[in-house]
Image (cartoon, rainbow, N blue to C red):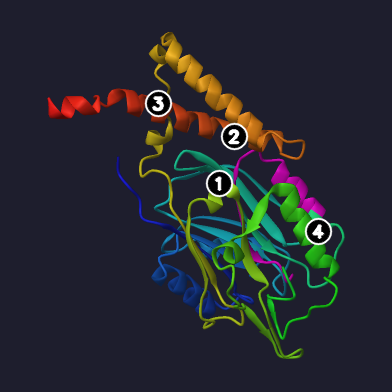
Amino acid sequence: MAVLFDLKIVSLNVKGINNAIKRQKILTFLKKENTKIALLSETHLTDSEHLKLRRTWVGQEFHSSYNSKSRGVAILIHRSLPFTLEKTMSDKDGRYVLISGYLYGEHILIGCIYGPNIYEATFLPKLLSDVASVHTPYIMLGGHFNCIPDPCVDQSPPRPTATSRKSLRLREFCQDLELFDTWRVTNPRERDYTFFSQPHQTFSRIDFFLSSRTILDRVRGCSINTCTISDHSPVSLCISPPYADPASCHWRMNPYLLSYPSFIDYITVQWNTFLDTNKTPYVNPSLLWETAKAYIRGSIISYTTAHEKPPLKNNYS
């Protein structure tokens, strides 16, 4: 089975790319970074202007526009990636675009977010509703959330006062969808920032990735990079994709296994163990089902592999 290189995703607030020269600089930068998926926020492009991003290495482009002066988000997919689109969802205010589809044979949801500057009570509930409508355990959201996850550690100088409404709603959003702040999980004791506010003279981490557990398990690294082509630092995420050949993901169980009582006993124990450990009143049923399928598939593969190996004593006969 062929093995892929790590998949690199870059999130960047571009602060407007109406200018053709700046737009080309952004695309060139992403290409040099070996970016496979780019999440661009604050593009300031109309629908027709967003199509101009489909150049050189970009094979697929998805966006949500507002006007040529503010907002706008875009997802760029490298032409080498075998991504098959299922559907897109976006809001009319140019604040997010979500795409669901199949990448290397796995059902995935990818989203680019540009959060409001001030608290808007309807923003996260609407986003949550759209994300939850796609039944997949593979969820990856990135962008400029305009929200500090934890003011005590994600802002300098820190603000150990009461957490803002935006931060509280973001935590609830992550809890409801079982998403994790990827940079914080991979850098639990670090302090780094993506934006410097001149008026307030503060550094803050307001650009980040939110990933589901199944994505998080494949993360090889998440880093905040040097701020060079925008007033925000790019955030990069590297994950290990499953297979090089999408067809290799379509695994099928050998039906002859069902004729072995030992296999039936084994898989029954594995199933009951999984449910005892994971089935709680708070878990999303669709997430539980998708995770269960992956767990049982792994258990069947382990059983098959173990029974294909010759007994150890045969190696010395």
Residue that badge 1 annotates: 214
The disc, 1 or 3, on the residue closer to the chain's N-terminal end is: 1
Q: In 3D space, how far apart are the residues under numbered discs 4 and 3 (Cα atoms)?
A: 47 Å
Q: In 3D space, how far apart are the residues under numbered discs 1 and 3 (Cα atoms)?
A: 22 Å
- Kind of residue sitting beneath label 4: Phe
Query: In what element is the residue under mark 4?
Result: helix
Q: In 3D space, how far apart are the residues under numbered discs 3 and 2 (Cα atoms)?
A: 20 Å
Given contact means CB atoms under 8 Å apart, are the residues at marks 3 and 2 in contact? Answer: no
193 in relation to 52, above or below: below
Name, please, the residue furthest toward the left. Answer: 317
Given contact means CB atoms under 8 Å apart, are the residues at marks 2 and 1 in contact? Answer: yes
Residue that badge 3 annotates: 303
Q: Which residues are magenta?
A: 125-148
Residue that badge 4 annotates: 123
- Kind of residue sitting beneath label 2: Glu
The quadrant holding residue 304 is: top left
Residue that badge 2 annotates: 290
